[in-house]
Image (spheres, rainbow, N blue to C red):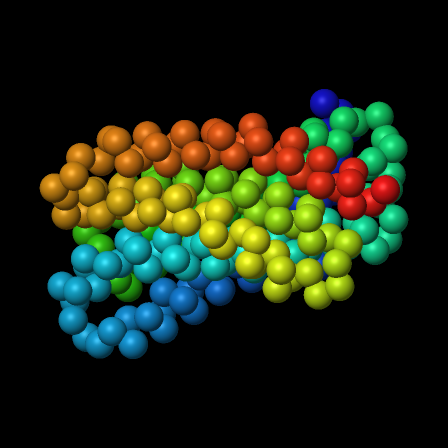
Amino acid sequence: MTAFNALLMRDIRLTMRAGGGALMGALFFLIVVTLVPFALGPDLALLGRIGPSILWLGALLASLLALDRLFTSDFEDGSLDVLLTGSLPLELAVTAKALAHWLTTGLPLVIVAPVLGLLLNIEGGAMDAVALTLLAGTPALTFIGLIGAALSVTLRRGGLLLAVLVMPLTVPVLIFGVSATNAAVSGPVPFGPPFTILCALSLMSLVIGPFAAATALRQGLE
């Protein structure tokens, strides 16, 4: 666990230092949430209905923004070879890197979502449920993206391929995340079933993602 914690803290520091980390993701989230209402027009009732969907779409795009750096810098400076041959199992190493990504990208989105919900005319009570769905669903986006990042790390201009690989896999998360938020805002579907499935998707990705990513790294770096 000492090596796991050290790798986790290292990646958090590097992310915050190199690319802006939480600030960059939150700013991109803000841009998406701000521009969409301009395209839709000044209909507050419409914004209130589709506001949760806009927040989820912004969270998805902001999460993808930094995924290409998940393994690229380690591949370029040789740190990835050290992780492959180190004492810490590769599955735990990629888990630490994914957790650092979520803490610096996904968690800030959850924190700023209630504030941005005010721009979309989402009621205060419903906004709590929206933030809860983002908290439950954004880990799935990170651990699904972990697989795509591992597959594209050795490829030139792999960022485009990463988006092509990851976007289809995130559709179920987006569907049930939006369904749960819409249920909280307007009903008539109960909030519990889609939220439970969303939590299940996050747990499943947490289990499958590190093993799939570790396998992809071993095959790609041989």
**Residue 27 pos. (x, y %):** 49, 64
Q: At x 20% / y 42%, what residue is drawn?
A: 183
Q: At x 59% / y 36%, what residue is drawn?
A: 209
Q: Is 207 placed above or below 118 here? A: above
Q: At x 71% / y 36%, what residue is drawn?
A: 214
**Which quadrant does the N terminus fall into?**
top right
When asked about the image quadrant of residue 4, the answer is top right
Q: Is residue 66 visible?
A: no
Q: How many marks?
A: 0
Q: Is 38 placed above or below 187 here? A: below
**Which quadrant does the C terminus fall into?**
top right
Q: Is residue 167 visible?
A: yes
Front-lying residue, 114 or 173:
173
When asked about the image quadrant of residue 210, the answer is top right
Q: At x 31% / y 35%, what residue is drawn?
A: 195
* Residue found at the very far top of the displayed protein: 1
Judged left or right of residue 115, residue 191 is left
Q: Is 132 placed above or below 53 here? A: above
**Residue 67 pos. (x, y %):** 61, 53
**Residue 21 pos. (x, y %):** 61, 55
**Residue 70 pos. (x, y %):** 68, 50
